[in-house]
């Protein structure tokens, strides 16, 4: 399979049938001369929106028999393109090896929103690509029926060839029927995708379709994009987020290759002929800033968060919590803290922009080509259709790294010089100017009766956020937009005592509270949001990992207070059978032995223990159960995760090989965030500017991983990119308690924090 994004100029748009016809098989970096129509485009630069109702917007068959699928969900290293190709292969009855993928191009692919939140496979399965492929197959079979003189219900398809069931000599290929031509047909909505029992590719392990290109260095990453006449830009960053520009005094001497210094309010950049010239110019430019400083440390940050009014939502209000707590035989209270963390993409962000009058072309690793298109159009003041966004894969990212922001950098500089500009961030840019994962404070109080039953649950969470994806706010949500003076609307504040609104899909509500069976009789959950001193955005499992850390740690604390086995105590309050299966499945995989925690056994300075955790991601998007085993050096405070046992339920499994890889990646990332990752802050700036000042897990810290996948072919697919990781920090924290009897309630579980917990237990 060839994974390629074809490129089109304005001249490639022709009046015609309203369909897209794409030349297949050309390399990703080459410009094609393929013509396609987008309605009346006499004065338009590109389509305002690729019509998702047209089969041609999703599927094209080449004269050589290759099939191209066109999708709005993009590959982030998660296997989305492979899963999409598998679904299309099954519906069209063609091999995966003969499918090409065009992804994330606002002139070619439908708008499927942002690739995020573990929604991609769900989206393609429930509609979009899978439905379009089914409709395309039906059209092709009907065309074959007319060509062969055989009723459609007497035809079958084998590897892209329509064959008579009774006479195998009567056959015609897709290429012969429509190769190189448009379907020119709208989807009817009446064609149903195949039953699960008919699927031959979905459910089987398939090698990642882009693997060969990546291994052979043939895939064009965003960092490799080059266009004719391209210049190079670098941004001169202020010392802190709220620093304001005082003066730009120029260079100590004439800089080789300098084209222009670009200044717009607090945005300062340099454009040069070559990349190394831009790097040197950015370092040499004399810029004076006024820096007001800000929050000095995490203690001050957490205190600020709890003291702000912010926005509050009452998510659960069952029974009389205050009365139940007052009458409880035992009351347990705990506070949990989660710091800023980084996406920390291994490759710094990059983008290429070409602003030519009222037309803009942007190559970007953005996860949402359509939202970013709108943000750029509004920032520059042109219609959306005048901005052509072309996705190019960048460094892996679950969430919002610098991809969107660097795209704005490139647009501003290209607009200023009238030529294409490539902006490549360096490591400090990526670490300091991305959107951090949100810090949170979570406080819980629970009541147990004389028999050790949970009778009351009171939970409050504070989240600090600022900015985010472009969305409806546009460029104001991104640091570059902020530097040029764009500001999002102020946060509205509300009192926390309004009627319940239901769960907020951020796992604020624990899985033990919301089911008809096993519901805690008295429960209150309040979620609060305040402004962050730093830009934040969705970092893999945004708010979900934080809330689950608190919820699953607290249910463990309640089990200990009740002198109950942590697994058995959880199972008392689980009404969802699939969540129950995750708990029991993980316990079985780990050889769980029922008993109250902590175990308290050790050999010399090394104590060992295991902890359990489980959750329903966002309440409805996949289930995971985790058991973590740890070693704790009671002398040094060092924690080592030795084994992680995982159960994962995502409904029907599209690609078990890809899913296993996702789960293993979840474990690695989750352990890294549990033990090592924390942005060092000082004032309104980050001190984590490189890998020496922002620690991530090394190979030597890798645990052994056992994965048990639960396949449910009768259920639709759910997300897998974030589920298991969401349960990791609590499982590790609970294992530390099991090993030592000490609770660590603030991430990451550093040596100093573990030693302090051991001392205070």
Image (spheres, rainbow, N blue to C red):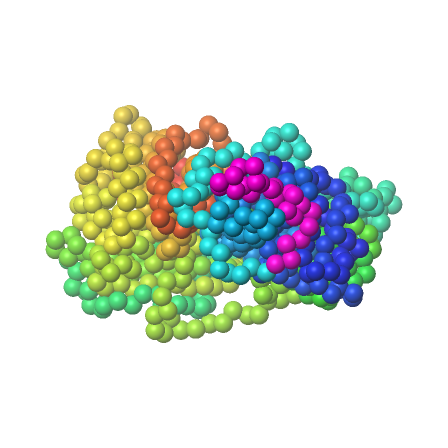
Q: Write the residue at 17% across / 45% down.
A: 563
The relative height of residue 163 versus residue 191 in the rendered view (above or below) is above
Question: 415 and 23: which one is in front?
Answer: 23
Q: Quadrant of residue 30?
A: top right
Q: Quadrant of residue 283?
A: top right
Question: 169 and 506: which one is in front?
Answer: 169
Q: Quadrant of residue 85?
A: top right
> Could you say where residue 741 lies in the image, as x and y percent from the top left?
26, 40
Q: Is residue 335 left or right of residue 688?
A: left
> Could you say where residue 509 lies in the image, as x and y percent from the top left?
34, 58
The relative height of residue 421 versus residue 321 in the rendered view (above or below) is above
Magenta region: 160-185
Residue 37 seen in the current view = yes
Farthest left residue in view:
450
Q: Is residue 106 left or right of residue 126?
A: right
Farthest top residue in view:
604
Residue 545 seen in the current view = no
> Could you say where residue 317 lies in the image, as x and y percent from the top left?
29, 68
Question: 65 and 400: which one is in front?
Answer: 65
Image quarter (top left, top right, bottom left or bottom right) of the N terminus: top right
* Number of on-image labels: 0
Q: Write the residue at 76% across / 58% down.
A: 14
Image quarter (top left, top right, bottom left or bottom right) of the C terminus: top left
> Could you say where residue 112 lies in the image, as x and y percent from the top left?
56, 56
Q: Is residue 542 magenta?
A: no
Q: Is residue 230 left or right of residue 296?
A: right
Q: Write the residue at 49% across / 41% down.
A: 165
Q: Write the residue at 81% across / 57% down.
A: 356
Q: Is residue 258 left or right of residue 184?
A: right
């Amino acid at each position: 399979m060839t994974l390629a994004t074809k490129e089109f100029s304005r001249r490639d748009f022709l009046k015609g049938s309203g369909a897209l016809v794409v030349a297949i098989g050309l390399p990703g970096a080459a410009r094609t001369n393929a013509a396609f129509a987008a309605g009346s485009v006499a004065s338009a630069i590109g389509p305002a929106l690729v019509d998702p109702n047209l089969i041609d917007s999703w599927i094209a068959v080449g004269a050589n028999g290759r099939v191209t699928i066109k999708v709005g969900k993009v590959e982030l290293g998660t296997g989305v393109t492979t899963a999409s190709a598998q679904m299309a292969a099954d519906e069209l009855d063609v091999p995966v090896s003969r499918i090409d993928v065009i992804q994330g191009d606002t002139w070619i692919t439908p708008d499927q929103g942002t690739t995020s939140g573990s929604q991609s496979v769900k989206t393609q399965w429930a509609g979009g690509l899978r439905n379009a492929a089914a409709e395309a197959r039906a059209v092709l079979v009907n065309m074959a029926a007319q060509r062969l003189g055989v009723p459609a219900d007497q035809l079958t398809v084998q590897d892209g060839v329509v064959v008579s069931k009774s006479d195998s000599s009567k056959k015609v290929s897709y290429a012969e029927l429509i190769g190189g031509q448009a379907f020119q047909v709208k989807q009817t909505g009446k064609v149903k995708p195949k039953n699960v029992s008919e699927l031959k590719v979905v459910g089987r392990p398939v090698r990642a379709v882009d693997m060969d290109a990546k291994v052979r260095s043939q895939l064009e990453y965003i960092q490799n994009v080059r266009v004719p006449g391209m210049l190079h830009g670098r941004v001169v960053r202020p010392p802190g987020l709220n620093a304001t520009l005082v003066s730009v005094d120029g260079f100590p001497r004439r800089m080789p290759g300098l084209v222009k210094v670009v200044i717009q309010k607090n945005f300062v950049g340099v454009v040069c002929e070559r990349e190394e010239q831009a790097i040197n110019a950015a370092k040499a430019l004399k810029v004076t800033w006024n820096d007001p400083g800000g929050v000095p440390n995490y203690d001050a940050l957490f205190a600020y968060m709890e003291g702000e009014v912010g926005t509050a939502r009452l998510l659960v209000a069952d029974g009389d919590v205050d009365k139940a707590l007052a009458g409880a035989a035992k009351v347990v209270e705990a506070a949990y803290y989660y710091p800023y963390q980084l996406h920390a993409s291994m490759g710094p962000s990059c983008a290429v922009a070409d602003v030519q009058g009222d037309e803009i072309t942007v190559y970007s690793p953005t996860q949402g080509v359509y939202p970013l298109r709108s943000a750029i159009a509004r920032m520059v003041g042109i219609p959306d259709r005048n901005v052509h966004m072309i996705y190019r894969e960048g460094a892996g990212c679950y969430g919002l790294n610098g991809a969107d922001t660097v795209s704005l950098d490139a647009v501003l500089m290209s607009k200023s010089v009238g030529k294409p500009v490539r902006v490549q961030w360096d490591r400090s840019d990526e670490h300091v100017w991305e959107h951090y994962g949100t810090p949170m404070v979570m406080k819980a109080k629970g009541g147990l009766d004389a028999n050790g039953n949970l009778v009351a649950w009171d939970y409050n969470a504070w989240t600090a956020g600022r900015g985010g994806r472009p969305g409806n706010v546009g460029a104001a949500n991104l640091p570059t937009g902020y530097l040029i003076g764009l500001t999002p609307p102020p946060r509205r504040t509300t009192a926390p005592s309004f009627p319940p609104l239901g769960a907020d899909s951020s796992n604020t509500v624990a899985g033990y509270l919301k089911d008809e069976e096993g519901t805690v009789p008295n429960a209150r959950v309040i979620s609060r949001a305040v402004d962050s001193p730093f830009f934040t955005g969705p970092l893999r499992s945004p708010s979900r990992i934080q809330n689950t850390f608190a919820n699953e740690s607290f249910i463990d604390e309640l089990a200990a207070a009740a002198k109950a086995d942590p697994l058995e105590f959880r199972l008392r309050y689980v009404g969802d059978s699939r969540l129950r299966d995750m708990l029991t499945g993980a316990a079985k995989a780990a050889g769980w032995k029922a008993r109250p925690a902590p175990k308290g056994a050790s050999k010399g300075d090394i104590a060992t223990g295991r902890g359990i955790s489980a959750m329903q991601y966002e309440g409805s998007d996949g289930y995971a159960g985790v058991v973590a085993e740890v070693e704790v050096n009671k002398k040094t405070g060092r924690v080592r995760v030795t084994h992680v046992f995982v159960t994962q339920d995502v409904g029907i499994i599209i690609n078990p090989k890809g899913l296993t890889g996702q789960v293993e990646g979840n474990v690695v990332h989750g352990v890294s965030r549990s033990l090592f990752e924390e942005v060092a802050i000082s004032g309104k700036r980050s001190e984590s500017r490189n890998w020496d000042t922002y620690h991530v897990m090394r190979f030597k810290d890798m645990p052994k991983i056992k994965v048990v996948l639960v396949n449910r072919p009768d259920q639709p697919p759910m997300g897998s990119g974030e589920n298991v990781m969401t349960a990791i920090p609590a499982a590790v924290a609970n294992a530390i308690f099991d090993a030592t009897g000490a609770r660590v309630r603030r991430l990451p579980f550093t040596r100093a924090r573990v030693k302090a917990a051991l001392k205070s237990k």
